[in-house]
Amino acid sequence: MCIEINREKRKLEIAKIVQSHKEGLHPCLSCKVAPKLGYEYGKETKTVPEKIEGTNKMKLVDKEFNYEFFTFYCPSCGFRAFPFDNIIAAISCWHTTNTPGNEFYADRWIELREKQKAEEMAAA
Ligand SMILES: [Zn+2]
């Protein structure tokens, strides 16, 4: 069975982690605004192999898993770092994509934002 997660408790845990990494969360490279965290969660069903008791055979069973996704984004321009299922990875991704004073990251930022704008246009 799928473990039930206390979401309120989990959100506090996440807020604590974000707070402790605040120094690493640069402002948005373009608008100098502090990023916000997008948090998505839910359950998904996956088909996984499971051993049939008392035999050496496997069978495929449907099991429910919890999932979480973290994405830092700029509330001003809408720039989004990549989504991760790990909060530290999401923090680190934002940190890198918004590195100030670096031409390479600035070019990459613009490229990524243009791609996101095109996706937003296509989805509208
Ligand atoms: Zn921005």
Image (cartoon, helix red, strand yellow):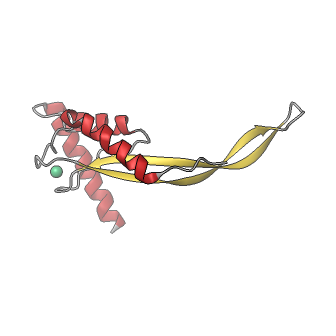
Residue occupying image coordinates x 42% and y 47%: 10
Report the residue that reaches farthest toward the right: 54
53 relative to 121, above or below: above
Residue occupying image coordinates x 76% and y 45%: 60
**Residue 82 appears in view:** no
Front residue (pair 90, 54): 54
Q: Quadrant of residue 89?
A: top left
Left of 26 or right of it: where is 112?
right
**Residue 86 appears in view:** yes
Residue occupying image coordinates x 70% and y 42%: 48
Give the quarter of the figure containing the C terminus: bottom left
Front residue (pair 97, 44): 44
Front residue (pair 50, 110): 50
Residue 62 in the image, given as x and y percentages of width and height: 71, 50
Residue occupying image coordinates x 23% and y 55%: 78
Report the residue that reaches farthest toward the bottom: 124
Q: Quadrant of residue 88?
A: top left
Residue 55 in the image, given as x and y percentages of width and height: 89, 33
Residue 63 in the image, given as x and y percentages of width and height: 67, 49
Residue 18 in the image, given as x and y percentages of width and height: 29, 40
41 relative to 93, above or below: below
